[in-house]
């Protein structure tokens, strides 16, 4: 089983920034999608961003577009979620997730937004934004 290790969560004031990291336990040159989901108490798990390593295409939800950004460090085999201009509504447990496949134009792939299509998940990291 592929394990994803997350870090970088914490507490910040509104307008602050955080960077989350996600490192898979196994490195592969095969195609894959790395997604970032979040879940607040009583809410459905929702995709906020994802990236395909096939063509480096990305997707961002409307609620985070312009504020969140995915980046990669191939040397460390690590994916990052840079979060800026954080709002109290961003408060949630954030999960990274991964699935295998060669995907082009991930922003047009609706399946990539469905959590049930991702077989591998990180342990989650808490992000709390205070007003």
Image (tube, helix red, strand yellow):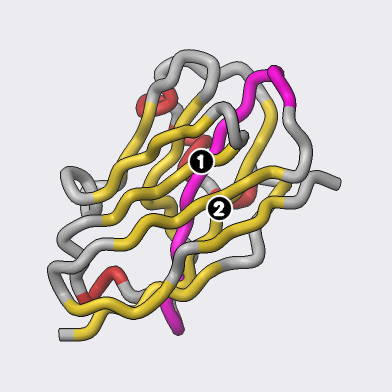
Q: Residues within 10 Å of mark 2 (few under 14, many from 20)?
A: many
Q: Position of residue 118 (x, y in %)?
A: 65, 45
Q: x, y (%) of residue 55? A: 46, 14
Tag on residue 17?
A: none
Q: Is residue 17 left or right of residue 34?
A: left
Image location of residue 43, percent across then percent down: 43, 75
- Is label 2 or label 1 in front? 1
**Where 55 falls versus 66 (above or below)?**
above
Q: Which residue is mark 1?
A: 79
Front residue of 96 and 118: 96
Quadrant of image for the C terminus: bottom left
Tag 2 residue: 96
Instruction: Give, as a single range, the part of the protein colored magenta.
Output: 28-42
- Characterize the local packing of mark 1: few (<14), some (14-19) or many (20 or more) Cα atoms within 10 angstroms: many
Q: Is residue 129 above or below residue 125?
A: below
Q: Which residue is painted at 69% across and 43% down in the image?
A: 24
Label 2: state its secondary structure.
strand
| Residue 15 rendering spot, x and y as whole percentages | 13, 68
Secondary element type, mark 1? strand
Observer able to see residue 28: yes
Marks 2 and 1 close (CB-CB < 8 Å): yes
In the image, residue 31 sits, relative to residue 111, either above or below, namely above
Distance CA(mark 2)–CA(mark 1): 9 Å
Counting residues from the start of the chain, the first of labels 2 and 1 encountered is 1
Total label count?
2
Residue at horizontal 29 percent and vertical 69 percent from the top:
90
């Amino acid at each position: 089983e592929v394990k994803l290790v997350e870090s970088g969560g914490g507490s910040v004031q509104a307008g602050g920034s955080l960077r989350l990291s996600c490192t898979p336990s196994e490195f592969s040159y095969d195609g894959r999608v790395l997604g970032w989901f979040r879940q607040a108490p009583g809410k459905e798990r929702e995709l906020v961003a994802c990236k395909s390593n096939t063509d480096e295409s990305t997707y961002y939800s409307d609620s985070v577009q312009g504020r969140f950004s995915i980046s990669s460090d191939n040397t460390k085999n690590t994916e990052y979620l840079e979060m800026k201009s954080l709002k109290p509504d961003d408060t949630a447990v954030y999960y990274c997730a991964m699935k295998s496949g060669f995907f082009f134009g991930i922003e047009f792939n609706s399946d990539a937004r469905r959590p049930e299509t991702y077989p591998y998940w990180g342990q989650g990291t808490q992000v709390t934004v205070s007003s």
